[in-house]
Amino acid sequence: MADAADIAAERECILRQEALARLHSARGAQRADLTSRATCEECGDPIPEARRAAVPGVRLCITCQKELEA
């Protein structure tokens, strides 16, 4: 028969596993958001590799980005 300390330790383990699962899930979502597109969402032109490396999660080519910011 488990005593109070065993029950508390088991509950703590469960809570820790749930928290770690949420953390890993959130990090996975962040990584997905940082995936750069190969082509511009707006015009469909290719986004150069240098821009994709410099701006993680880039969605627009330089021209469309400038137009958006203007």
Image (tube, grey):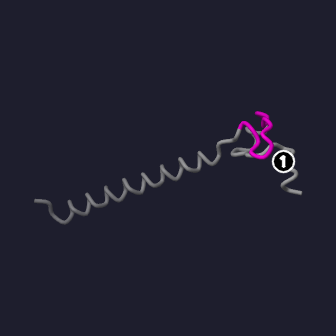
Magenta residue check for 13: no
Q: Position of residue 56 (x, y in %)?
A: 70, 44
Looking at the image, residue 50 lies above or below residue 14: above
- Could you classify mark 1 by the number of other residues whose Cα lies within 10 Å: few (under 14), some (14-19), or many (20 or more)? some
Residue depicted at x 84% and y 44%: 62
Q: Residue at x 87, y 50 (%)?
A: 66
Q: Amino acid at mark 1?
A: Cys
Q: Quadrant of the C terminus?
A: bottom right
| Residue found farthest to the front | 43
Q: Nearer the viewer, residue 18 or 13?
A: 18
Which element carries disc 1, helix, strand or loop? helix
Q: Residue at x 59, y 45 (%)?
A: 32
The residue stretch that appears in magenta: 38-50
Q: Which quadrant is the N terminus positioned in?
A: bottom left
- The secondary structure that most of the magenta stretch takes on is loop
Between 68 and 4, the one nearer to me in the picture: 68
To which quarter of the image does residue 37 belong? top right
Q: Among all residues in the image, which is located at the extreme bottom?
A: 4
14 sits to left or right of 45: left
Question: Residue lying furthest left in this view?
Answer: 1
* Percent position of residue 60, x then y: 78, 46
Can you identify the residue that label 1 sits on?
64
Question: At which x and y percent is residue 17?
Answer: 36, 53
